[in-house]
């Protein structure tokens, strides 16, 4: 088809795999969009190797949408690669990611663009669109509707939010902050690719989705983490709403995959906040399910408060005994502070206060770490020393930190009355 002469204001990237009927509903809702002011939008369907009727569905929308398709060979779950490939085809300055089977309301594209237009000067935004009915941790209702036979989105969710079962699973978290993620310290934990947007410039600056994520979950949090590290402002748009169509899910397998991928994320970005995120998913429990009542936000705020309290706590005397260790003794110190004493042997140094990490005055590298999940192999050191800088978090996290210390070291010594 001939593309319109104007440059689209946004590109909607829809990854799909053997979801022809669900995709039909998504495209029908996109075809019913109110056109953005000052230009239209385009749609890129990025196909991860479908063998169903997806090509036929796409032909139905020729002439109704500014539409193109990317197809990649089926080599397993490669949603991250599919989204990246779709993004590379974008000619609009804003990327909107929307899952197949999610049907946007009529003002969806306009609302995403409005959220970016309201970005403060010099800042970029990462926008999480509110998605009614999105509950990836639960089996769908027995009664299902798919494709264009389902009710139009504005009918299905009117009035929005009145039925708790129809709320976005993140609703309680959003509501806690008055739907203002600027008040959160870990806003990226709610940036999910089911319905989100970011500028092309910001997406490219952080390298897009990490294609090493080859199973369900985690790749969107990883993208959000990197956007946050680069200074993006996170916002929720209730106007950029969409409705998830109930469909079959492999809930148990997806949650197990998500936990594995959170571990990969934590190892990729080792620091206290990702350690805490992983610890939540790694906690053995019966009937595991996603619960936004346990809040990474609260735990990380606690860690930040304790780091501030311990900032001036000098543990040089506690570490003085290291000077007398035999040459070649391998050591790790958890809670080393910003000024490890001179004359101590080479050591793996960690502290949970970001302001004290980096290069110490003695020329030692201090890494940002809590001790719940350390970027070190099993039995890599002879001794692990845990200083009193960690005493304020010991009641909550001591058991996990001690277990990790025993994993990496042959002998563990707690240098305060906390054992």
Image: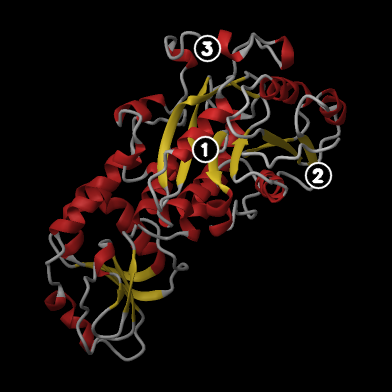
Q: Dot 2 corresponds to which residue?
A: 74
* Quadrant of the rendered image containing residue 321: bottom left
Measuring from the top left, give residue 297's x and y in whole percent: 31, 41
Q: What secondary structure is found at the residue carrying circle 2?
A: loop
Gap between marks 1 and 3, in whole Å? 20 Å
Residue 418 makes an appearance in the image: no
Q: What secondary structure is found at the residue carrying circle 1?
A: loop
Q: What secondary structure is found at the residue carrying circle 3?
A: loop
Measuring from the top left, give residue 304's x and y in whole percent: 23, 52
Q: Dot 1 corresponds to which residue?
A: 192
Q: Residue at point 34% right, 41% down?
A: 296
Q: Which of these two is toward me, 262 or 28?
A: 28
Q: Dot 3 corresponds to which residue?
A: 157
On the rendered structure, is 267 left or right of 47?
A: left
Q: Residue at point 40% right, 67% down?
A: 408
Quadrant where the N terminus sits is top right
Answer above or below: position of 361 versus 334: below
Measuring from the top left, give residue 210's x and y in whole percent: 60, 54
Tag 1 near tag 3, CB within 8 Å: no
Badge 3 crowding class, 10 Å Cα cut-off, few under 14, some 14 to 19, many 20 or more, is many
Q: Which of these two is toward me, 198 or 173?
A: 198
């Amino acid at each position: 088809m001939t593309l319109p002469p104007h440059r689209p204001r946004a590109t909607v990237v829809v990854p799909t795999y053997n979801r022809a009927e669900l995709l039909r509903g998504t495209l029908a809702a996109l075809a019913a969009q109110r056109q953005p002011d000052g230009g239209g939008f385009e749609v890129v369907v990025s196909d991860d190797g479908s063998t169903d009727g997806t090509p036929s569905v796409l032909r139905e929308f020729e002439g109704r949408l500014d539409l193109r398709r990317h197809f990649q060979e089926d080599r397993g779950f490669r949603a991250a690669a599919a989204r990246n490939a779709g993004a590379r085809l974008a000619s609009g300055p804003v990327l909107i990611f929307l899952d197949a089977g999610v049907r946007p309301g009529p003002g969806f594209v306009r609302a995403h663009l409005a959220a970016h237009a309201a970005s403060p000067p010099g800042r970029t935004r990462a926008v999480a669109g509110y998605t009614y009915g999105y509950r990836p941790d639960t089996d769908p209702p027995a009664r299902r509707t798919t494709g264009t036979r389902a009710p139009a989105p504005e009918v299905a969710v009117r009035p929005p939010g009145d039925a708790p079962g129809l709320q976005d699973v993140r609703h309680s978290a959003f509501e806690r902050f008055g739907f203002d993620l600027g008040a959160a310290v870990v806003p990226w934990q709610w940036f999910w690719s089911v319905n989100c947007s970011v500028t092309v410039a910001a997406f490219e600056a952080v390298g897009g989705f990490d294609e090493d994520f080859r199973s369900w979950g985690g790749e969107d949090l990883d993208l959000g983490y990197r956007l946050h590290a680069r200074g993006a402002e996170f916002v929720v748009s209730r106007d950029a709403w969409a409705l998830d169509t109930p469909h079959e899910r492999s809930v148990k397998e997806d949650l197990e995959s998500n936990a594995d991928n959170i571990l990969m994320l934590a190892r990729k970005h080792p620091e206290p906040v990702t350690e805490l995120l992983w610890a939540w998913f790694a906690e053995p429990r019966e009937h595991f399910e996603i619960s936004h009542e346990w809040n990474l936000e609260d735990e990380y705020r606690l860690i930040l408060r304790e780091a501030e309290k311990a900032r001036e706590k000098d543990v040089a005397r506690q570490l003085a005994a290291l000077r007398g260790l035999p040459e070649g003794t391998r050591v790790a110190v958890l809670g080393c502070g910003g000024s490890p004493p001179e004359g101590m042997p080479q050591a793996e140094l960690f502290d949970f206060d970001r302001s004290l990490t980096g290069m110490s005055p003695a020329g030692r590298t201090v890494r940002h770490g809590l001790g719940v999940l350390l970027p070190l192999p099993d039995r890599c050191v002879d001794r692990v020393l845990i200083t009193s800088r960690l005493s304020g978090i010991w009641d909550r996290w001591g058991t996990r930190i001690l277990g990790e210390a025993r994993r990496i070291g042959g002998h563990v010594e707690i240098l305060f009355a906390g054992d």
